[in-house]
Amino acid sequence: DIYGNEKYDVKLGNRQRENLDYSGNWWGTTDLNVIEERIFDGRDEPGLGVVAVSPVSESPWREGGGTGGN
């Protein structure tokens, strides 16, 4: 699960130029617009990588039910 943080749920740093795959996670919602507003990436600052989130999980993971790296 990735949600409920202060300003951003994911924020790429200055040197993060590679794209990241965060698909399959629960973000507290399934609304892609809401999710993408909580991510700071190449859509906000050119030159940074882009965080892919789709498809998103439809519900929170049960404890111990992670995907092993996503």
Image (tube, rainbow, N blue to C red):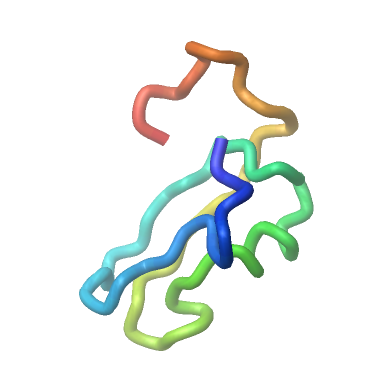
Up/down of 37 relative to 24, above or below: below
> What residue sits 35% from the left and 31% below the top?
69
Number of numbered markers: 0
Considering every residue shown, the one lying at the far left of the view is: 15
Q: Is residue 56 left or right of residue 43?
A: right
Q: Quadrant of residue 47?
A: bottom left
- As drawn, the residue found furthest toward the front would be 6
**On screen, 16 above or below 63?**
below
Q: Residue furthest top?
A: 64
- Residue placed at 57% from the left, 66% from the top? 7
User: In this image, 18 relative to 8: left or right?
Assistant: left
Q: Give the farthest residue toward the bottom.
A: 46
Q: Position of residue 37 (x, y in %)?
A: 65, 69
Residue 32 falls in image quadrant? bottom right
Q: Which residue lies at the image location 61% right of the left edge and 15% below the top edge?
A: 62
Quadrant position of the N terminus in the picture? top right
Rendered residue at 71%/42% (across/down): 28
Q: Residue 5, how many percent across, how many down?
A: 56, 53
In front of the other: 31 or 55 = 31
Q: Position of residue 59 (x, y in %)?
A: 72, 29
Q: Is residue 49 left or right of residue 53?
A: left
Q: Name the image quarter holding the C terminus.
A: top left
Q: Nearer the viewer, residue 30 or 14?
A: 14
In percent of width and height, residue 38 lies at 61, 64
**Measured along the vertical axis of the image, is residue 46 above or below residue 40?**
below
